[in-house]
């Protein structure tokens, strides 16, 4: 998948929850194709106002950016400010409980269960991730791996 038109058609309707791996790839120069696509997807979701991210994703990105990407805290802060242009959903105690239930129901890790809970609470139509089974629905939401579309 390359080009703005293809990205717009991928994200044409409804809201999309952005998983941590999309944000990490947008900041990782190790794979330029994934970086370019991740940047384009994130930019389109910001432009359209249909992107959703959680405080959990912001924290996971920050941890990976320090540990794996070697980014400075100043760079991470700048990136977080950009990501705040997406709809940011705070993880609450209720969403954590729901995340446990969804993790059990879908055989997911606790962390992925919370991702599904937040995306469902935000009324997303899809989860953008490479970490979920794209053949399954999670709480009624499809999973789109944008890198498989390439």
Image (cartoon, grey):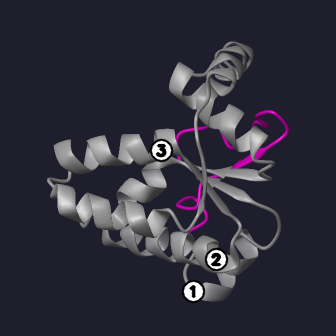
Residue 68: tell me if it is visible: no
Instruction: Give the labeled residue for mark 1.
Output: 3
Residue 35: tell me if it is visible: yes
CB contact under 8 Å: marks 3 and 1: no
**From what the image shows, is residue 7 above or below residue 83?**
below
User: How far apart are labels 3 and 2 at the CA level?
Assistant: 22 Å
**Circle 3 sits in a helix, a strand or a loop, which is it?**
helix
**From what the image shows, is residue 96 above or below residue 4?**
above
Q: Residue at x 61, y 36 (%)?
A: 115
Judge depth for marks 3 and 2 and give the one in front: 3
User: How far apart are labels 3 and 1 at the CA level?
Assistant: 26 Å
CB contact under 8 Å: marks 3 and 2: no
CB contact under 8 Å: marks 1 and 2: yes
Q: Residue at x 76, y 39 (%)?
A: 121
Instruction: Give the labeled residue for mark 3.
Output: 57
Residue 51 falls inside the magenta stretch: no
Q: Residue at x 62, y 26 (%)?
A: 113
Instruction: Give the labeled residue for mark 2.
Output: 7
């Amino acid at each position: 998948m390359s080009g703005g038109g293809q990205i717009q058609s991928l994200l044409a309707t409804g809201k999309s929850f952005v998983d941590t791996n999309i944000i990490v790839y947008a900041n990782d120069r190790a794979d330029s194709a994934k970086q370019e696509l991740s940047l384009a997807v994130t930019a389109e979701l910001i432009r359209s106002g249909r992107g959703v991210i959680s405080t959990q994703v912001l924290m996971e990105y920050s941890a990976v950016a320090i540990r794996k990407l070697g980014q400075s805290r100043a760079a991470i802060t700048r990136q977080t400010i950009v990501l705040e242009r997406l709809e940011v959903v705070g993880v609450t105690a209720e969403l954590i409980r729901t995340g446990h239930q969804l993790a059990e129901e879908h055989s997911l890790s606790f962390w992925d269960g919370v991702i599904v809970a937040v995306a469902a609470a935000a009324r997303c139509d899809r989860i953008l991730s490479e970490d979920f089974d794209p053949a399954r629905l999670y709480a009624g939401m499809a999973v789109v791996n944008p890198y498989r579309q390439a």
